[in-house]
Each structure stands twice: as C-alpha cells, then as structure tokens.
Amino acid sequence: MRYCHVLLPDKTEPVCLPEICVEEKDVIQHGPDVIISLPDLPHPPQPALESENTPSLQSILYGKELLLEEIQCTWEELNPFLRAGLVTVRAGLHPTKNGYKCRRCHNSDPARFGVFFCARCQKDCAYCRHCIMMGRISTCSALFRWNGPPSSFSPHISLHWDGIFSKGQKRATETIIQTIKEKDELLVWAVCGAGKTEILFPGIETALQSGQRVLLATPRTDVVLELLPRFRHVFPEAIIAGLYGKSEEKQILAQLVIATTHQTMRFADAFDTVIIDEVDAFPYTAETSLVQAVQKGKRKMPPRFISPRRQPIRCKSVYKNTPFP
C-alpha cells in the first residue's frame, strides 16, 4: 500500500491519503510511496462533525492510534473521514540515525527490529519485533487516529460503597482527591492489604463526576480480571472496560479503563487521570517503553497523573531491623 500527500480542492493544508483514495481533482504533493518515505505532516486542526455515521468509528479510534486491521473498516468507509480531517494517518515506524523508532511501543533498539519480504509493498520491510504480539508494524504500516471532537461522558456517576476508612486511609483519600483537582502527581505507598484499591474510589469518583476519562494500569492480566468486577460493582453507572491480551472489550469507548500496562501502547492523548497500580513491579520497572506508553496515553493538557516519577523505579536499599519511615 502506497500513500500520498494530497492537497484537496477545499483545503489549504495537505492530508495523507492512501493511493487508492486519491481522486482526479486532488493535487499530489508527495508520493505515491511507502508511508515511511513521506515527510511528517503537522497535526491538523480539529474539524467539526458533519456525519451522523461517525459515532461507531469515533468509539473505536478516539484516544487511540491503531492499525488498519484493528479498525476493521474498508477504504471506501474510511475515505470520507480522511478527507474531512476527522481521521489522520502517519507512519508506524519513524526513521532515525541508527535505524527506526516504533511509534506504538517507542522501541528504537536495532536488535529488536527484523526484516521480511512484504507482500503488501512487494519488497523487504523492516518491522518492530518488540510489540509484534499487538499486530505487526512495518515500514509500510500506517497508524490511524481520531482527530474529530472528543467524546463526552456522563457526569452522573456516584460511588456505591459503604465501607468506613481508618484515619490513615481517610487522609490518603483526601490527598488523592486534592491531587486530581490540582492536576498534580502523587505516589501512594502502602503495604499489601492496606486498602489501596478502596482509597482510590473517592478520587476516581471525583474524576468521573467531572466528566474525565480515567486509566487504571496494572502489570498483570490477573489483576485486571480481579479489579474489573470490584469497580463495576461500586460504579454501576460508569462504562468500564478491561483491556488485556485476549480481552473482547478493546473497541468499547469506556470512561474508566482498567488495562495492563502493555495495552496502553495503543492509546494517545486519551486520559485525564492515570493511576498505575504496583508501579514498582515488573514489567513496568524494567521496560522504559511502558513508561513512555503511559505518558503518551495521558492528555497533554491538563496533566493528571498518579505515579512516582517519569522513569522506572530503581530500588537502591532496603530497611532491615528498623521501623519503616
């Protein structure tokens, strides 16, 4: 598949289109060529919705960057959105001095790229081996992203939980709520069994009631499966999706997303509040790509992020035979 940079009759800035969607009246400025060979276009302004058929595609693409195979649309269906600027497209791999950088998982290690003969472009293509389990991204692969108006979520969500907090837990919940309101960052440090999940409830309620979108990322699939019924029980009005390798909820537009950290690679500018469970656990501490994926999943403005730091934690010492600080 080859792409072009095209100036449409009613536009002042070019758009990226697959060669199959170019019409006679369009003015080709670059291409046709494999998408990685085309220069990057500036991000276009957000257009208004003009079609009644956009909600289904919006629910799939909003806050994400996906391969064409993940969207499950034909070019005929996708073409009007590309031409209107409601969906943008860019290369999945970015050329660098030493090779490539994957725009989904941020891998730039030459040892984690391979080469294969591509039936799509009929020549050898480099591809990212680091995130191959999520679908192959190669030099001719494109990532599609929603550029239309954001989805709105119902603020009429309340917490259905009648538990009682201890003094320490209550102080933690108040701090979390204040952190979310002030768009700040926070590390919650507590021992196993201290009620870490429960003290998140009021803060998440605050975020949901303000119409925000929340991500709760965790290292393992079993934790996602454990947390899903608990959060669906206490927030019955909220749309909640659980994302992991074999999840069937990946196309649900949810206000609260509970996902493995690897699944955050598909998101971009999606979440107002991000909570990382077990931030000191493998694989989050071992893979910088996961830290970068979570950062990409945050909205650029406003930055609300509950996490200790921007880099993985490296524990240098432990306390022995002394009280915890």
Image: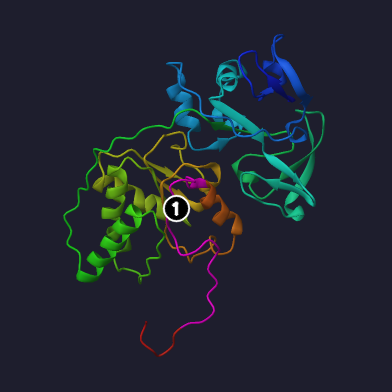
Percent position of residue 301, x then y: 46, 45
Please state which of residues 261 and 58 is positioned toward the viewer in this rendering: 58
Q: Is residue 325 above or below residue 50?
A: below
Residue in the picture at 43% in, 37% down? 249
Residue in the picture at 73% in, 55% down? 109
Within the image, what quadrant is residue 173 found in? bottom left
Majority secondary structure of magenta residues: loop
Crowding at mark 1 (Cα within 10 Å: few <14, some 14-19, many 20+):
many
Give the total of numbered labels.
Answer: 1
Within the image, what quadrant is residue 10 found in? top right
Instruction: Give the SS element for disc 1.
Output: strand
Please state which of residues 176 and 129 is positioned toward the viewer in this rendering: 176
- Look at the image and tell me in which quarter the N terminus lies: top right
Residue in the picture at 40% in, 32% down? 151
Instruction: Tell me where the magenta segment starts and ends, as one range.
Output: 297-318
Identify the residue at the far top of this view. 24
In magenta stretch: residue 304: yes
**Residue 58 falls left or right of residue 119:** left
